[in-house]
Image (tube, coloured by chain):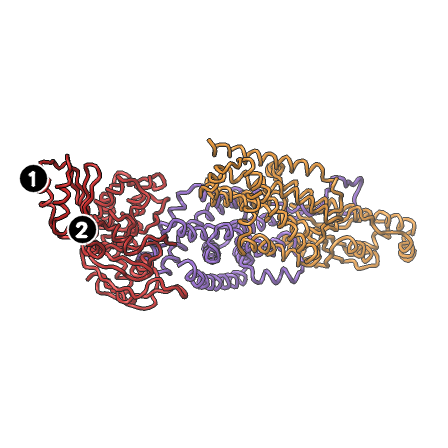
Amino acid sequence: MNILTIAYYTAIKYLRNPIVMLTYILAPVVIVFSLTGTVENKFIDTSKLAWIGVSNLQVTMISSNIDDRIAIVCLILCIFYGCILCSYTMISEFKNNTNLRFKCSPVSFVENITGKSLGNVGVLAICTLISVLIIKYAFQVNFGGNVFLLILVFLLFLFIINFLGVIFASFCKNIYICALLAFAFNFTMIYPVMVDTYSPINSKVIDFVSEFSIHAYVVKAIYGIINGDVNSITSSVIILSITTVGIFGLSLITGRRSLK
Amino acid sequence: MTIFFNSLKRLLKNKVQIIVLLILPLIPIMPICLESSHSMNTLKIGIVDSDKTGLTNLLKDELKANFSVIDIKESDINNIINTSKADFIIDIPKGYSEDIINLKNVKIKGYANKTKDASPIVRPFVDNFINPIKKVSMDSNKNSSIFYKSLKNINLKQNKNISNKTDSKDSDIAFGMIIMFVMFSSVFAATQIITDKENRTLFRTINTGVSLRSYMAQNILSFFVISIVQIVVLISIVVCGFGLSPGSSLINMFAFLSVISIVSVSLGIAITAISKNVTQAIMTGIGIVTLMSVIGGAWGMEPTSKLVKAVSNIMPITYAMDGIDKLLNNDALSANTQNIVILLAFACIFFLLGTWKKTDILS
Amino acid sequence: MIVEVKNLVKRFDQFIAVDNVTFSIKEGEIFGLLGPNGAGKTTTISSITGMSNIDSGEIKIFGMSMKNQEREIKKKVGIVPQDLAIFEDLTTYENLLYFGKLYGLRGGELKDSADKAMEFVGLLDRKKDYPKKFSGGMKRRLNIAIGIVHNPKLVIMDEPTVGIDPQSRNYIIDSIKKLNERGTTIIYTSHYMEEVEELCNRMVIMDNGKIIANGNKEELKEMVSLEEKIDLEVSGINYTIMDKLKSLNGVTDCSMKGNKITIVSKKYSKITQKIINIISDSESEIISLNVEKPTLETVFLTLTGKKLRD
């Protein structure tokens, strides 16, 4: 019951804050809106080039689902910043001294972290759901496939980012540094996915980073769900589940040292 | 200059801050720099060669000299386009060479992605290759041996005016990351002013007889010095360590980034002026800088939506990235005069926004 | 005994913050824990509340050991920390409900307790307001309310009145007395000696991690002072009066300045009536008479010294 109580009050604090809600709902929407279909940066200004007369090339246009993939990658990119919210939840309790009250109350550290994690994930899940609905219906992005699997993948990702937020907060109780750590981690993880989406290349570095990239597995799982690729779904979900458990354990260890 | 040195000391006071300032930015820059030299900007052409003749081999060789070419199967065409493994596919039908020799009006098939149509680049290339060959075939009188002999005598090499821009997009993104982190650091440094207000040391300082103007000027100077130090360290690592190209002149690049650091500092001051507390300032700053960077092209992606493009024109990072782009293309610093003027104008606006509110402290 | 602390030792690396401290607290009393800055009061309180681990010694609260039955003990202990510990983005009522639930209250009992706590501190009319709009005194009161919402048997208050106006302070002191009348045992720390003197039944004074004095206020005052001072203002003084006053049994010093006489006598000399008789007999009139006894502040400064602390 303590876990649910902590989760409830953690969530309502953020649900009441319009700035937090708007930021986490609109940021993915704005980024997707900006970048969907943005691959012409690769080309030079072709307005100078013109051809006159009959061409030797007969071109057929193929409609691709590149926009959908860009939208999904941008969504994952923006959702990850939810870990800053999670770091803030931990850090704010030191600022307003309520961590003392938790220490003196009959609530264990594990219950505390679990409750806060549930609260944070709840808020982020609501924001993600609203963003996904806007992206799906307003921008016509294909989020087809098994809805329950999609929810599972997103939830696993949200739990991972929550526990990462706890880990960042345990390194430094300064929200600025946590935000920068989040940015650095996010960009490093999303980079191979972006390269693969925009312009796949053979690169050992990219392959190496994508082996350890949580974002890559999430995107792979989502593509798998949309395309009905069972193997992709299974392998990605297993890896994400193991990662969630592992990062949860790590967050308890690091959090116990500096957040207790 | 007491306030200036004190401010510098506070900003560099502990190891964590120094690591965040100088080492953390390298984490996202590293994979960009370590990636193979294969440029993201190179067009990828897939070729389905059902003909496999000397002529088609010549075409393939010429394409390889200008683009990144992969051989594919006809059945994979849709999938290759959908997964962006190639930007354009050239499908040479069987019997094409013979039809050319026999003066038949045949065309090579091309397949392009509807959302990123590469045909404006590939079409003239193919035309510039095939049109001379058609002339040769007219002269060879449908004789294939004369045709191939004559081919050896003509120059089929294309001028590289339809070049791929050999400058690597990787450098763009790396410098974009440097600009982002300099802006982050400037926002954080500027929160020192809010901290001074909160813990009342600002009032102590003003009561010593130091004018508010002097206080602000010395603090701003210290923030500028910090961002210059950051730029120097990061450029050194990226250029000397990872070997990324800074364009024709490293000094030009440094000078341009110094102008950007003025904008960063002024943006930091503006953000702290509108924020009530440190946390709000940091979150606002990070949000604004990230959004500006994504829309402005610091992440290597530019928007195509007209509305968003219009919005990006009122963001300093757009002009910063345009300047970086020009410098990486070996243009002189003077080619960036317009960008520098615009960036300095942004800096003035941000400074005005940031400093006019400070007068209420005394009242 | 509701709290028993035996040979408590707490170290931070080489520094011994609490050095073999032993004391006990009876149920229903208000117990003062005094000492200069750095004496070890907060560390002692942290050890009692389970916020920090101890190096050696034993702490028993309600007859239960902190090591083995921490959770049960914590359910019955309330804390009012020195620094405000409230959620500014939850309303007054929500703050109380939140912590009430964490302490195990549910349903109707929880709501009743929250209402009573708000009424107790005088914030019932601000139930739905956010603490960020409150004054310092109101925040302090909410801080107390959260510490008592679960009706604890033991409440630890660490300088609950610091930085607030006299009206709020008086209100809080009266509330503490009412709380104690309800049967709650209170451990109280403060640097305001007049508060401690007014509230506490018994107190210990700590310095450098050790207890240097233990007892009620009378016992502590006895420790440091053997004399009383009497200040008189009379209508007319002459040398005859002065001689008679000096010759009284127990008087150690007698001086005059204008119409004012200062007499220093040994404690329990019981000479006040004799002084009045001497003045009356000399046909002078006593305008004012004041018997000055040692205060707790005097005791504190005498025992801990007047040197500034870190």
Q: Which chain, by letter, is red?
A: C
Residue beneath disc 2: C252
Q: Nearer the viewer, residue C137 or C20?
A: C20
Quickly name the residue at label 1. C281
Q: Which chain is orange?
A: B
Q: Residue most toward the top? A: B363
In this view, the residue in front, B69 or A253, is A253
Q: Report the Cα–Cα distance between label 2 and label 1.
A: 22 Å
| Chain rendered purple | A
- Residue in the image at 72% along x and 37% along y: B337
Kind of residue at disc 2: Thr
Packing grade of label 2 (10 A; few <14, some 14-19, many >=20) is some
Q: Can you see residue A106?
A: no
Q: Looking at the image, is A79 positioned above or below residue C134? A: below
In front here: A66 or B187?
B187
User: Do tags 2 and 1 sit on the same chain?
Assistant: yes
Looking at the rendered image, the quarter that the N terminus of chain A falls into is bottom left
